[in-house]
Image (cartoon, rainbow, N blue to C red):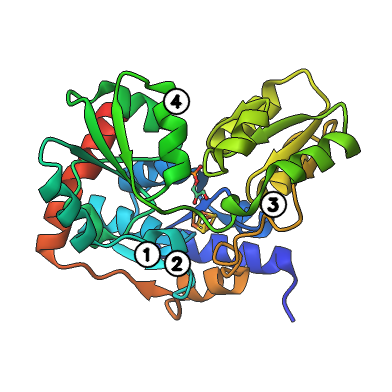
């Protein structure tokens, strides 16, 4: 049986030989991140994959991330490393619901979290990620915004951009939504000297108790730059592990043991190896019309997010 290091070396060799780029979301396992060309949050991944010189992109993450890459680079072959990795939140709201709400609220600008399907993006005006949402929403010319699907992220943005009227629908991340104020109290007691850093997909009661709220990248940057030693991390567990590697002199603890995204955990190093061997993953296929319509809101995100 091949050792982890040998599998990683084989992936790196095949990537070079076949002109393949491997992109990994920061929630991926350490061994995948080490073999990837770049790692980042959903915003960074979409921009970096579009700029990559290779003609084939292997996305280690969930389906909407691979779809976003395909929309931005339709000429490239885009593979989702594990075909079963989806984001349950992305499937919570469909196009028909957004069209119906738009009809009764005609003046509203529809802002979609990037965690949505390509199909839903075709009826949205602008896309946002957790790292770019506040900046983008505050730059929008319209004052009435329909924000879908994450009501927690939407409410967090609304608190920071009070001059905009933000309408929310019911939706949220089942992983982050599960954390509550009792979990915060328990960790404050267990780690009294630690700073609490949470993702805006957490509920308002959790965000209100945190020392810092930000995207995966913002959380990592905050912890790396901080003079503090101990941190409790309120986002997917892998950020705890990745931060611990980056900052060996600091200490990182998960806010709860349940902060695990089962979909993000589906991709294995073997999946990545199979993809670069040409024998695995799911090729993302989107029709021209969907790509053209969905691209409008992603281009707007890049224009306003830069
Ligand atoms: P980021 O936009 O911070 O990468 O988060 C993506 C995600 O799926 C969080 O649950
Ligand atoms: Fe989707 Fe939540 Fe998993 Fe992120 S953590 S991919 S939002 S289910």
- Contact (Cβ within 8 Å) of mark 2 with mark 1: yes
Q: Is residue 20 visible?
A: no
Q: Is mark 3 on a helix, strand or loop?
A: loop
Between discs 2 and 4, the one toward the N terminus: 2
Between discs 3 and 2, the one toward the N terminus: 2
Q: Work out how far the residue at label 2 is from the one at label 1, CA to CA, in angstroms.
A: 9 Å
* In this picture, residue 58 sits left or right of residue 8: left
Identify the residue at horizontal 39%, vertical 53% (top origin). 170
**Callout 1: few (<14), some (14-19), or many (20+) C-alpha neighbours within 10 Å?**
some
- Picture layout, residue 66 above or below residue 303: below
- On the image, the x and y values in percent for residue 218 come to 56, 31
Res 190 → quadrant: top right
Q: Is mark 4 on a helix, strand or loop?
A: helix
Q: Is mark 4 within 8 Å of ligand 1?
A: no
Res 265 → quadrant: bottom right
**Residue labelled with disc 2:** 86
- Contact (Cβ within 8 Å) of mark 3 with mark 2: no
**Callout 2: few (<14), some (14-19), or many (20+) C-alpha neighbours within 10 Å?**
many
Q: Is mark 2 on a helix, strand or loop?
A: loop
Identify the residue at horizontal 38%, vertical 59% (top origin). 90
Viewport quadrant of the N terminus:
bottom right
Between discs 3 and 1, the one toward the N terminus: 1
- Pick the front one: 204 or 224: 204
**Residue labelled with disc 4:** 159
Q: Is residue 82 visible?
A: yes
- Contact (Cβ within 8 Å) of mark 4 with mark 3: no
**Residue labelled with disc 3:** 237
Q: Work out how far the residue at label 2 is from the one at label 4, CA to CA, in angstroms.
A: 29 Å
Identify the residue at horizontal 10%, vertical 50% (top origin). 103
């Amino acid at each position: 049986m091949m050792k982890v290091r040998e599998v990683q070396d084989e992936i790196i060799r095949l990537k070079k030989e076949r002109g393949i780029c491997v992109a990994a979301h920061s929630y991926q396992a350490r061994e995948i991140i080490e073999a990837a060309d770049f790692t980042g949050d959903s915003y960074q991944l979409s921009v970096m994959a579009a700029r990559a010189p290779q003609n084939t992109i292997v996305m280690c993450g969930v389906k909407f991330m691979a779809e976003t890459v395909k929309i931005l680079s339709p000429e490239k072959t885009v593979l989702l490393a594990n075909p079963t990795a989806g984001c349950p939140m992305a499937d919570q709201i469909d196009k028909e619901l957004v069209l119906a709400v738009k009809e009764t609220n005609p003046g509203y600008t529809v802002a979609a979290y990037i965690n949505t399907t390509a199909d839903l993006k075709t009826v949205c005006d602008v896309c946002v990620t957790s790292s770019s949402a506040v900046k983008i929403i505050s730059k929008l010319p319209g004052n009435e915004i329909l924000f879908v699907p994450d009501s927690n992220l939407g409410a967090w943005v609304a608190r920071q951009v009070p001059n905009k009227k933000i309408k929310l629908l019911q939706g949220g991340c089942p992983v982050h939504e599960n954390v509550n104020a009792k979990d915060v109290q328990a960790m404050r007691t267990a780690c009294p000297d630690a700073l609490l850093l949470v993702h805006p997909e957490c509920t308002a009661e959790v965000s209100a108790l945190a020392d810092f709220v930000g995207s995966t990248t913002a959380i990592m940057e905050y912890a790396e730059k901080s003079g503090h030693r101990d941190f409790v991390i309120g986002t997917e567990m892998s950020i705890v592990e990745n931060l611990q590697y980056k900052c060996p002199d600091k200490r990182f603890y998960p806010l709860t043991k349940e902060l695990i995204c089962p979909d993000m955990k589906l991709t294995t190093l073997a999946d990545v190896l199979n993809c670069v061997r040409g024998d695995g993953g799911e090729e993302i296929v989107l029709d021209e019309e969907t790509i053209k319509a969905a691209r409008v809101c992603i281009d707007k995100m890049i224009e306003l997010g830069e």
